[in-house]
Amino acid sequence: MKKILAIMLAALMIFSFAACGNDDGGDKTTEFKVGVIHIGNPADGSGYSYAHDQGIVAMQKNLGLTDAQIIRKNNIDDTNAAATKTAIEECIEEGCNIIFGTSWGYMETMAELAEQYPDVIFSHGTGYMSNDTNFNNYFGRIYQARYLAGIAAGLKTQTDKIGYVAAMDITNSEVTGGLNAFAMGVQAVNPDAKVYVKVTNTWFSVDLEGQAATALLDLGCDVIGQHCDTTAPQLAAEQAGVWGCGYNSDMSPDAPGAHLTAPIWNWGVYYTSATQAAMDGKWAEFGNYFGGMKEGFVDISPLSSLVAEGTAEKIEEARALIVSGEYDVFQGAYIDADGTVIDKDIVDNQGNVVIKAGEKLSDSTITGGINWYFENVIAQ
Amino acid sequence: MNTIVNFMFAAIKAGTPLLFGTTGEIVTQKSGNMNLGVEGLMYMGAFGGFFIAYKTDNLFLAMISAALFGMLGALIYSFLVITLKANQNVTGLALTTFGTGFASFFGEMLIEGGSPKLSQKMTELLSEKPIPVLGEIPFIGKILFSHNILVYLAIVIALIVWAYMRFTRPGMKLKAVGENPAAADAMGINVDITKYVHTLIGGAICGMGGAYISLINGNGIWNNGCVNGQGWISVALVIFASWSSAKAIFGSLIFGAFTVFQVRANDFASEFAFLSFLSKIPNAIYVMLPFVITAGVLIVSSMRSGGSDQPASCGTNYYREER
C-alpha cells in the first residue's frame, strides 16, 4: 500500500514539474501579470470595489489578457498594514509586474514596498505619494461629475432641502470638495435650495449611513446625495418615497424608485492606459494621473426616468463647458441661466471669500486643501 | 419637538437588534455559559433570516429560519463547552470568527451578479406603520406605536424571558444551575440538559437579532458585514442591564440613542440654543460613550455590597465528578 502511494506521489511530482515547464517560453502578453488589491469584495454588485473591478475587467478586455494574468486580493483592510503587505507580497510572488492598490490606506505600505521591489510597478489610487521610477498615484476630477449630479438634485427637490451623507468631516478635502461641487451644482439651478450634511466618520457602514440618511429625511430633505460606499442612503430615500443621487456605480438597480443619477468612475480608462504603458516598457514617462471628464475618466450614470424636466439639457450645457475647459467648478465663477460662465467670488458658509473672482484652485489644493463648506451648505 | 420625537423613534429602531442580542445572551449566561460569540450568532441569523425571506417571501418562516441558524451556532458552542468542556471564552471568540465567515461565504453566493433585494410584499410587511388608534396619539404614538413588527417582537421576547426567570419553575431551576451547578445537581436538576436547552434558546434569540439587522437595517438588501460589532455591544449591554431582560429594554434604548445621536447631535444643536455646544463635540465621543458607561456600571456594581449580578458559575464549566 505504501509503495503504491509512493509511486503515485512521485508520478504526481513529475507531472507537476512538467506543468511548470510549460509556463516558460510564452510571449510578453501572456507573461505579464496584473495584481489588484481591493478593500471590499467586487462581487458585491455595486459600490467602490465593484466599480474598480469593472475597470479591471474593461482593461483585461481592451488588452486581451487572460483570467490567469489578473490576480485579485479582496477584502484587504486598508488600516491593517501587515495584511496589506502580505497581500501585495503574494501578488509579487505570483509574478505580478504591476500592482494596483485601490484604497487610500495602502499608500504607505506601497511606498515602502516600491523601494524593496524596484522591478515591480506600484500604482496607488486616491493617494498623493509617488516616486520617479516605479510608484505613481492616480485619481480623478470626480468633483466635475458631482457638480452635474448636483444639478439633477437641485432641479428635483421640492422642499428645497437636499441631504448629503458624507463619510468624513470638513477636514477631508476629497469629501468636502466633492460636497462643495455638488452644492455648487445645486445652486446653479436652484439658488433657494440648501444642502444639509451628516457625517458618519466611516467609509463603509450600512447602519450608520442608513441612520444618517433617515436623520436627513427627518429634516425634510427630499433628495439624498452621498459620498460613502453602501447603497443604504438610496434605499432609505426609496422607502421614504423621495429621491437620491448615489456614488461609485449606477445605483438605479438597487433603488429603482429613488435613484436619479450617480457620479461614477470609469476606472478602466486609467487601468488600460497604465497597464499598456507598463507592458510597453513606457512606464518611466507615465507619471501621476489626475483624469477628468474630458478623458472620460469620470462621468455620471445615465439619468433615470425620475429626473425633473429639463435636467438633461442643463447637464449637457454644463458638461460641454467642463469638457471644453471653460468651467472647472473650483474657480471664481458660475454658470448663469443662459449657460455663460461669469466671474464671481466664491464664498463659504461662514461668509469668507475662498476663491476670488477669476481665479482657479490648483490641483494640489483640490486634492488636499478644501476645508470649507460652500455657502448653501448647512452643517451647523 | 419633532427633533426629539424623530430621535426617540430612531433610537428605538437602532436599539432593537441590541435588545435581541442582549436577551439571548442573558438566557445563555444565566445557565452559566459565557458565550462571547453573539456577534457570530447574529451573523448566522442575519443570513438565515434574509435567505428565507428572499426565497419564500414569508416573514414567519424567515424568523424561524433565523432562530434555527442562531441555534445551530449555539449548538456548536454547547457541544464544545458543555459536552467537551472546552474553554468558554476561546470557544465564544472562535464562534464569532466562524459566524462572520459563514455569513460572508453564503452571502457572497447570494449576491453573485447584483445584490439580492427583498420583494415589495416583504418590504411592505416590514415597513413602519402606526398601530390603529394608539399610533394616533400625539408624540407618543410616533415614538412607541409606529414601529416595524419586529420591534414589538423583541420587546415581547424580553418580557417573556423576564417573567420566565422570575415566576416559573424551569426559570428558577435555570438560575440555580447558573449560580451553583453542583447544588442544582444535588437537587436533582439535570445540569447539562438545562445548559443545553437555554444556550440553544439564547442562540435562537440572538439569531433573530441578526435577522432584524439584515431585514430592517439593510433596507431590504443583503450586505456582507452587516452586523458590524452589534453583537459585541450586546455582550456589553448584558452587564449594563445587570442580567435582567426587563432592564435590557431600557439599556438597549440608551445604547441605540447614542448610536443615532452621532448623526443627530447637530439637529439638537440647531433646534435648542442651550444645546449648541453639542455640535462642537467630536463624533468619536458619542461612539465611545456607551462603552464608557458600561465600564462605569461595572465599577459601580463591583463596589456594591453583595457583589455583581453575574451568575456565580458563569464562565466556568461544570465537572460532575469533581463535586
Image (tube, coloured by chain):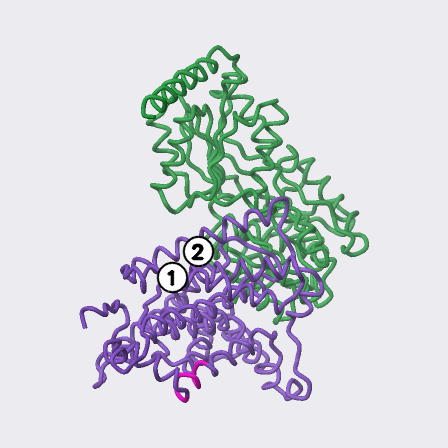
Chain colours: A green, B purple
User: In this view of the protein, can residue B174 be seen by the observer?
Assistant: yes
Quarter holding the N terminus of chain A? top left
Q: Amino acid at mark 2?
A: Gly
* Label 1 in the same subunit as label 2: yes
Q: Which mark is residue B37?
A: 1
Residues tagged 1 and 2 counted as in contact (Cβ below 8 A): yes
Q: Amino acid at mark 1?
A: Gly
Q: Magenta span has B129? A: no
Q: Closest to the observer: B273 or A214? A: A214
Q: Which tag, 1 or 2, sits closer to the chain's start?
A: 1
The CA span between labels 1 and 2 is 8 Å
Q: Is residue A227 above or below residue B183?
A: above
Residue A312 picture location, percent across and down: 78, 48
Residue A264 picture location, percent across and down: 63, 44
**B322 to the left or right of B98:** left
Residue A279 picture location, percent across and down: 52, 19
The residue positioned 61% from the left and 60% from the top of the image is: B52
Q: Residue furthest left?
A: B322
**A88 to the left or right of A25:** left
The residue positioned 52% from the left and 81% from the top of the image is: B156
Q: Which mark is residue B99?
A: 2
Q: Closest to the observer: A276 or B267? A: A276
